[in-house]
Amino acid sequence: MKISIIIPVLNEEFTLSLLLPYLKQNSTSKNIAEIIVVDGGSTDGTFTVAEAENAMVISSKKGRAIQMNAGAKMATGTVLYFLHADCLPPKNFDVEILNAISKGHKAGCFRLKFDSNHWWLRLAGWFTKFNWSNCRGGDQSQFITKTLFEDIGGYDESFFIYEDNVLIKELYKRNCFTVLPKTITTSARLYKEKGIWTLQYHFWTIHLMKRLGASAEELYAYYAKNIKESETNSPTTSSQKIFADK
């Protein structure tokens, strides 16, 4: 078994320049089929950085679900590992994933912690150790066998947000999701930009809207109005802290 790492990006020049070497240093090359960077139309040096680190770089329409599906189609590995550009998986993440697969777990994620000492974010990270669907999110990364991913039909491209949760809900219905005991570190940059309680309120609202039957378009309209980051917003400061902590 080999892992194809799939990273959807948009203007992540700096984070990729640190993430890609980190992935190589914290995994075993024989376990990695390839690293696929799926670019959604970056205007910075994202493409150049990814190529310089010998990643496979492909262009795609913008939209995380669309980009991740595009990466999955190009993947040659038997296991797909979807990773956000501002997240750092634990050391030997590849071994952890392959061990889980060998034990019959066809899909799962890692526990989560933020690069912040705020008590609420520490608590939110603590809850991710429980194997409950409501404690899941894309920042925890997602591994899944390619066969299962194709059987489900991949990510639902009608969702421009919440696409991770839609896939995860389906995996829980099939009783084939596990949470690995090691921890992935993610950036709290959006919480710092929007304010912790303001952003958490909006996230809870989106979850409630989905439970009450809101469409993908309605969810995105709310997100675009209240949460969406500027596409030119630089992640440099937060990313520097994550990698410094490592």
Image (tube, helix red, strand yellow):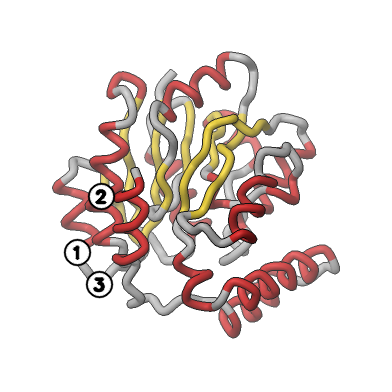
- Residue 10 placement (x, y as % from top left): 35, 65
Rendered residue at 52%/56% (across/down): 65
- Say whether disc 3 or disc 2 marks the residue closer to the N-terminus: 2
Q: Which residue is mark 1?
A: 45
**Front position among marks 1 and 2:** 2
Q: Is 137 situated left or right of 240 in this image?
A: right
Left or right of 73 in this view: 50: left
The label on residue 37 is: none
Query: Which residue is the site of mark 3?
Result: 43
186, above or below 230, in the image? above
Name the quadrant of the N terminus. top left
- Name the residue: 30% across, 19% down: 30
**Residue 34's x, y, as percent?**
31, 33
114 vs 23: above or below: below
Helix, strand or loop at label 1? It is: loop
Q: Nearer the viewer, residue 175 or 199?
A: 199
Q: Residues within 10 Å of mark 2 (few under 14, many from 20)?
A: some
Q: From the image, tell me which residue sits under label 2.
A: 18
